[in-house]
Image: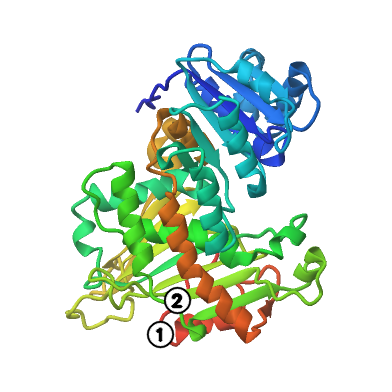
Amino acid sequence: MVSRVIPVDVFDLVIFGATGDLARRKILPGLYRRFTAGQMPGDSRIIGAARAELTDAAFREQVRAALTEFVTKDRLEESAIEGFLARLLYVPIDATGTSGWSTLQGLMRDRVVRAFYFSVAPSLFGDIAQRLSEHGIANAQSRIVVEKPFGRDLASAKALNAVLARHFAEAQIYRIDHYLGKETVQNLMAVRFANILFEPLWKAEYVDHVQITVAETVGVNGRGAYYDTSGAMRDMVQNHMMQLLCLIAMEPPYHFDPDAVRDEKLKVIRALKPVQPQDIVRGQYGAGGGDPGYVIHAENPASKTESYIALKVGISNWRWQGVPFYLRTGKRLRARTSEIAITFKQPPHAIFDDASGWHENVLVIRLQPNEGMNLMVMIKEPGPGGMRLMQVPLDMSFADALGEVAEDVPDAYERLIMDVIRGNQTLFMRGDEVEAAWAWTDPIIQGWEGRGDRPQAYDPGSSGPEDALMLMHRDGRRWREIRE
């Protein structure tokens, strides 16, 4: 099987915040891998822009160090590194002032794609957008990429949308959520809409419940002060997990078209029911296993911010009425894993006398680690002695099934940046989608803040607060075990 590399047009990509952590860890290494894959055609260029007073040569040395640290050794060839670095330029720039903008304007070329990546704090989005417009650096065909957090509530999200809309049309704005760039996330749509096997069963008549888990082993080390103003609800549920829920629950779009897909996702968000207090469990990890605990990292002994949250969510539409969606995410949990599990209902009639080995059919989509899918099905237990049932997985690991092709699959940032260059917004959030997500999220946060609820303590390396188990147990269900 041969991996297909889809060409893109010649481009100039300007990265604001090019000396920052995200650029070093993800954006620039991802672009290098796309360069080695042949997706940086002709004389395409990457222009770094940041406050630091660096020369082109000094910036290139910083990027070389980042490649050495964050790209696997088998991809690091000196000739490729030199070829990539030769495409890099750097402009010292003051995002809120006047210096550097004329220099950047002078570097812009006609008849190439102009893209601008805002790898900076959201407070700078408006300043940068305004200066790109005032100095004629961006044109009507330009694209801008903005990182989360896109607001911290509905009011701030609307304000950010309004600021960007003063200078760019919605079709030019790419709100990036790297979860949507993951191969398995996109395969949700392929599994549903390209296989007659699944789509007829993808509804309340056959689905018992859905679990979405995003578990992390890391804590908030080094991010404590920021995270304490955010929490798991804002940091993960409102964006990443909301997007996963939408892809599972949305109706088939009329075509695989950016606005058609996003229209259907928006309908799901607007159909989400308000979440009741008894259907919310919030947790905060304590000290243990060499970790001093959340409040120490946050430098806030009285913190009420959650590092874990579990929710039971319902959708008010014909397809999903009565089907609970259980969402959970947290830090300092037992294992690093992200997965979606669709559990199907039991057959309407049991024909076997010995049903002790019976388990539900479950379709599990693994996002990390070891991207892939498995379908848990029932078979006869081998051997004599009657019809005894057992559950086995029909397993598809991308690495095993696709061989060398899997090794060349772009990571999320690589894929999404190339989609920006192509002008494909399918995997990016639209402004009304972001606002609808905050409109659902805000009352939940305001509810626990108004009640003065404190998160429950849980041990680092555990599966989270005990009450999260009861969220499922009272419905006669169980969480899937958190494991690698």
Left or right of residue 334: residue 167: left
Is residue 29 visible to the viewer in this orientation of the structure?
no
Q: Up-down: is 55 above or below 229?
A: above
**Position of residue 226 measured from the top left corner of the image (x, y, whole percent):** 72, 58
How far apart are the alpha carbons under marks 2 and 1?
Answer: 11 Å
Q: Which residue is depicted at the point 28% across and 71% down? A: 320
In the image, what residue type sits under mark 1? Asp
Is residue 220 visible to the viewer in this orientation of the structure?
yes
Of mark 2 and mark 1, the one earlier in the sequence is 2
Question: Which residue is under mark 2?
Answer: 312
In the image, what residue type sits under mark 2? Lys
Number of marks present in the image shown: 2
- Along the line of sight, which residue is nearer the eye, 120 or 190? 120
- The answer to the question of whether label 2 and label 1 lie on touching residues, with beta carbons closer than 8 A, is yes
Q: Quadrant of residue 330?
A: bottom right
Q: Which residue is depicted at the point 55% across and 51% down? A: 160
Q: Quadrant of residue 386?
A: bottom left
**Position of residue 350 measured from the top left corner of the image (x, y, whole percent):** 19, 80
Mark carried by residue 64: none
At label 2, counting other C-alpha atoms closer than 10 Å, the crowd grade (few under 14, some 14-19, many 20 or more) is many
Q: Which residue is depicted at the point 63% across and 79% down? A: 449
- Along the line of sight, which residue is nearer the eye, 387 or 473? 473
Left or right of residue 463: residue 19: right
Secondary structure state at the residue bearing disc 2: strand
Question: Which residue is under mark 1?
Answer: 475
Secondary structure state at the residue bearing disc 1: loop
Q: Up-down: is 396 above or below 129?
A: below
- Along the line of sight, which residue is nearer the eye, 271 or 349? 271
